[in-house]
Image (spheres, rainbow, N blue to C red):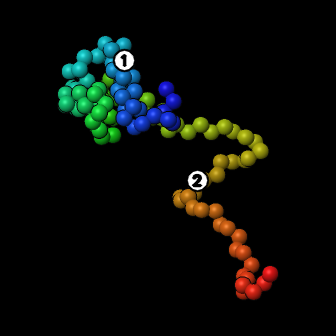
Amino acid sequence: MDYKMKTDESIIQDLAAKFEALRIRKRIKDTDIEKAGGISRKILYNFRKGTSVITLKSFIRLLRGIDELDRLQRLFEEIREYSPLEGPEKELPKRVRDPIKEKEAFKWGDED
């Protein structure tokens, strides 16, 4: 599913469906998820329904409940390819700023 053209709600519903399929494939009961993840039945119900917002913390607990927390780590995994032409890795800047624009020559306004 390409998420670029989907609404937030449809993405949440798709994630909930994939979560549910994974839970069933691993044969994990709801009560086991609640115990292992430390979440309430209502949070699990709200996530499955896909119409109510849950917190990121709750989502982490849901993944912990089905022993799939490593999927979050892979979400932002850095893939760096070595290139001998680039040399050693450069340190990332602390901020991202707009590029510096070259200053235009001052004009009095009567030039033309």
The residue under label 2 is 92
Most foreground residue, 52 or 92? 52
Residue 25 position, x and y percent, is: 36, 13
Q: Quadrant of residue 61?
A: top left
**Mark 2 vs 1, N-terminal side:** 1
Residue 100 position, x and y percent, is: 65, 66
Label 1: element kind: helix
Residue 91 position, x and y percent, is: 60, 53
Label 2: element kind: loop
Q: In which quarter of the image is residue 73?
A: top left
Residue 95 position, x and y percent, is: 53, 59
C-beta proximity under 8 Å, tags 2 and 1: no
Quarter holding the C terminus?
Answer: bottom right
Q: Which amino acid does label 1 sit on?
A: Ala
Say whether residue 108 is left or right of residue 76: right
Q: Residue 21 carries which label?
A: 1
> Count of labels shown?
2
Above or below residue 111? Residue 25 is above
Q: Residue at x 36, y 23 (%)?
A: 17
Residue 70 appearing in the image: no
Seen from this angle, which residue lies furthest right?
112
Q: Residue at x 77, y 44 (%)?
A: 85
